[in-house]
């Protein structure tokens, strides 16, 4: 065997060369010969002695046709007569001629056109920036609300909240105040409570970033949070919940801590927070206080009452006139010779209607609360205050009802004043939380934890007062809550005394709420329709009020509402509660759904029908009819429906209690048609108590009935 390179002998190598040339001569249709392909890629042939030519033309640029004619072709086998062109044509200069008879538009090369992929959230953020800028420019809440509605994308509303406040943070107090006012206006109608909370949480999460550009970002953000709580667009519980999601070392945690301790826990925090950015006047609280102090000082020097009243009017802060009253009274205590002038100024301001009776009342109340601190500088402060109150009442510039609410002059409930004040503070938080969560059992538990049933009338007054200044949803919730509390928690006397307190201050309430008298009349009438009060209780309430006062007129209006045709249905729907059906229609629907379920219907369907009624305050009727039908049909399957309704939270313990109570009241009549009604009802009660539908205390009236 030859010892040359590779595995082939010289003879074999020669034979392979001849065979390759013959193949090239006869296969003209092949774009490249095997050897050419191998050489083009720099790969050796089987025999190591045969190598690819290093750039020569032999065997690559000459082809022979079948006729034997030599044809020189282009490099890489492209072009030339009798050839197909390159195996893969990558010539970038190739042009397709549209005038060619064989032109096919499908052969045109594709061109990728670059386009920007838009993110809906980015587009939304750009749009709201222009809305906010325009609002800061024209101060038109209506336009801003309309633009936000048209923009849609309610799922992005948290980003609107965040953007609005973040843009206001880096501006003047005017824009900060405008941002808070806009959020309050958009709350519930345009932006849901949930989206508001989510937006504030996004802000707090970003506190670390804000601090980089805005040095006082923590304090500003804390004030926005506190203002939202005061404006009732954030529940007080928001702070606690948000803290759990943040690390203690974060700026967001510090924001919440500052909002709680520096603002919401401060005395008179509502007034402080609401006016921190100057309120509607765009002037800061400190500036207003300085102006008040200066005008009072000037008044003491010149004694010009008309000029002092003009200066008070020019302040344009009627919501802050209680500060004028408070500072004037303190000045009268500090400078005893100034007391006659101060009395003259306050009396004239009251007679002109410049300082309302509610602001006068509030000024005295604020001063009374600070008497302990004031006594450190003015030892006789309490004695002087006690002498000022009867004088102000006798001269007619302080309402006589102040004595009833004053700890110094004898509290209405003969309790410790500080205890009453603490109770009021607690119940405001409880009521706000209820308006946010709509959780009656939680509220009842909170009241039980306070353990002060003697203050129930105060709670009723505060509940309705807060509801009157809010939307119809909260008014409806207040009436529903009152109905629930009247079962086993509030006595009739509690409710009567609560309404007496409300109606005694009706004139002051009307200064802040224009239609207060009408609203109170509806609350009274609704209490009668819900059987919280009996019609005769209206006479009892009227007898406790001074004659010819606003409160007496309100009671008369409530009587007129109740005397009207279809009063029940109209009053039940006065705030849009429930489904809008008449009571008789609702009762008919309840009877039909129970009959269908009793005859073999599906429990989930029956549950859905109860839910579709949209009358949670009327679910006691479902309980009542289910119990009566179970007695009549001797079918305890209806109790399974009540069990499932209770498990799903559809029928609350309060509604269960009310339903059982109504059946208990009607047992004597039921016994005429159902002889064993008493025994059946007693067994139902025991079952309800064991399953948790009813409270154990329901047992006492059962024995009496039996």
Image (spheres, rainbow, N blue to C red):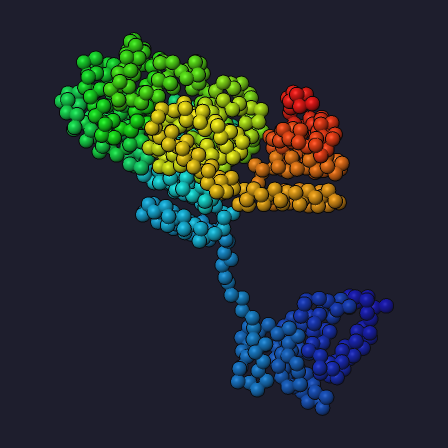
Residue 251 visible (yes or no): no
Residue 629 sits in quarter: top right
651 versus 419 height, above or below: below
Task: Locate residue 41, reporting x and y percent.
Answer: 67, 67
Residue 586 falls left or right of residue 479: right
Task: Locate residue 234, reporting x and y percent.
Answer: 47, 35
Which quadrant of the rendered structure holds the C terminus? top right
Task: Locate residue 58, reporting x and y percent.
Answer: 67, 78
Which one is in front, 79 or 178? Answer: 178
Which one is in front, 537 or 36? Answer: 537
42 versus 493 height, above or below: below
Give the residue displayed 53% in from the left and 82% down from the top: 98
Residue 267 visible (yes or no): yes
Residue 627 falls left or right of residue 515: right
178 versus 378 height, above or below: below
Total numbered labels = 0
Give the residue displayed 81% in from the left and 69% down from the top: 8
Which quadrant of the rendered structure holds the N terminus? bottom right
Residue 226 sits in quarter: top left
Give the residue displayed 66% in from the left and 21% down from the top: 704
Residue 488 falls left or right of residue 184: right
């Amino acid at each position: 065997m030859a010892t040359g390179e590779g595995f082939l002998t010289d003879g074999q190598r020669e034979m392979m060369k001849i065979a390759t040339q013959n193949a090239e001569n006869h296969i003209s249709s092949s774009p490249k010969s095997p050897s050419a392909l191998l050489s083009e890629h720099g790969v050796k042939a089987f025999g190591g002695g045969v190598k690819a030519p290093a750039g020569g033309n032999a065997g690559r640029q000459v082809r022979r046709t079948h006729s034997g004619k030599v044809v020189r072709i282009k490099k890489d086998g492209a072009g030339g007569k009798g050839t197909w062109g390159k195996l893969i044509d990558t010539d970038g200069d190739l042009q397709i001629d549209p005038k060619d008879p064989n032109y096919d538009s499908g052969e045109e090369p594709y061109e990728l056109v670059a386009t920007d992929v838009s993110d809906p959230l980015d587009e939304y953020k750009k749009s709201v920036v222009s809305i906010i800028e325009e609002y800061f420019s024209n101060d038109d809440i209506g336009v801003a609300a309309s633009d936000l509605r048209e923009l849609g994308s309610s799922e992005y509303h948290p980003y609107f909240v965040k953007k609005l406040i973040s843009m206001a943070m880096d501006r003047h107090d005017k824009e900060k105040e405008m941002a808070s006012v806009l959020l309050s206006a958009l709350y519930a109608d345009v932006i849901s409570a949930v989206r508001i909370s989510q937006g504030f949480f996004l802000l707090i999460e970003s506190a670390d970033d804000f601090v980089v550009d805005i040095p006082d970002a923590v304090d500003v953000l804390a004030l926005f949070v506190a203002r939202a709580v005061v404006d009732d667009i954030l529940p007080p519980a928001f702070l606690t919940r948000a803290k759990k999601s943040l690390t203690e070392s974060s700026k967001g945690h510090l924001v919440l801590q500052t909002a709680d301790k520096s603002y919401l826990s401060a005395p008179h925090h509502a007034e402080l927070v609401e006016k921190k950015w100057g309120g509607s006047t765009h002037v800061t609280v400190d500036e207003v206080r300085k102006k008040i102090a200066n005008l009072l000082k000037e008044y003491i020097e010149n004694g010009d009452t008309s000029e002092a009243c003009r200066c008070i009017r020019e302040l344009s802060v009627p919501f802050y006139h209680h500060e004028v009253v408070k500072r004037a009274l303190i000045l009268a205590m500090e400078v005893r010779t100034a007391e006659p002038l101060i009395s003259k100024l306050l009396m004239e301001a009251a007679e002109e209607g410049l300082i309302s009776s509610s602001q006068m009342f509030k000024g005295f109340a604020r001063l009374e609360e600070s008497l302990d601190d004031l006594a450190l500088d003015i030892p006789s402060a309490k004695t002087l205050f006690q002498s000022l109150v009867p004088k102000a009442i006798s001269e007619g510039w302080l309402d006589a009802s102040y004595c009833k609410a004053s700890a110094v002059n004898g509290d209405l409930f003969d309790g410790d004043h500080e205890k009453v004040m603490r109770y009021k503070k607690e119940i405001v938080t409880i009521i706000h939380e209820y308006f946010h969560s709509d959780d009656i059992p939680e509220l009842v538990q909170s009241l039980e934890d306070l353990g002060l049933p003697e203050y129930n009338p105060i709670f009723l007054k505060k509940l309705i007062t807060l509801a009157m200044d809010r939307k119809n949803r909260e008014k409806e919730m207040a009436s529903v809550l009152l109905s629930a509390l009247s079962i086993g928690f509030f006595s009739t006397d509690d409710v009567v005394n609560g309404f007496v307190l409300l109606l005694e201050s009706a004139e002051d309430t009307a200064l802040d709420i224009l239609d207060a008298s009408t609203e109170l009349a509806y609350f009274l009438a609704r209490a009668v329709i819900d059987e919280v009060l009996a019609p005769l209780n209206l006479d009892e309430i009227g007898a406790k009020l001074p004659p010819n006062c606003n409160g007496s007129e309100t009671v008369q209006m409530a009587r007129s509402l109740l005397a009207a045709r279809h009063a029940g249905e109209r009053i039940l729907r006065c705030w849009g509660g429930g489904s809008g059906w008449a009571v008789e229609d609702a009762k008919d629907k309840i009877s039909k759904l129970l009959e269908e379920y009793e005859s073999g219907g599906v429990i989930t369907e029956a549950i859905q029908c109860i839910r579709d009624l949209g009358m949670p305050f009327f679910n006691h009727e479902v309980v009542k009819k289910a119990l009566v039908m179970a007695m009549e049909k001797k079918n305890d399957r209806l109790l399974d429906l009540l069990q499932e309704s209770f498990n799903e939270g559809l029928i609350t313990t309060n509604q269960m209690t009310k339903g059982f109570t109504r059946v208990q009241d009607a047992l004597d009549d039921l016994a005429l048609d159902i002889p064993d009604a008493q025994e059946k009802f007693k067994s139902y009660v025991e079952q309800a108590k064991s399953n948790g539908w009813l409270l154990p205390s329901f047992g006492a009236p059962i024995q009496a009935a039996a």
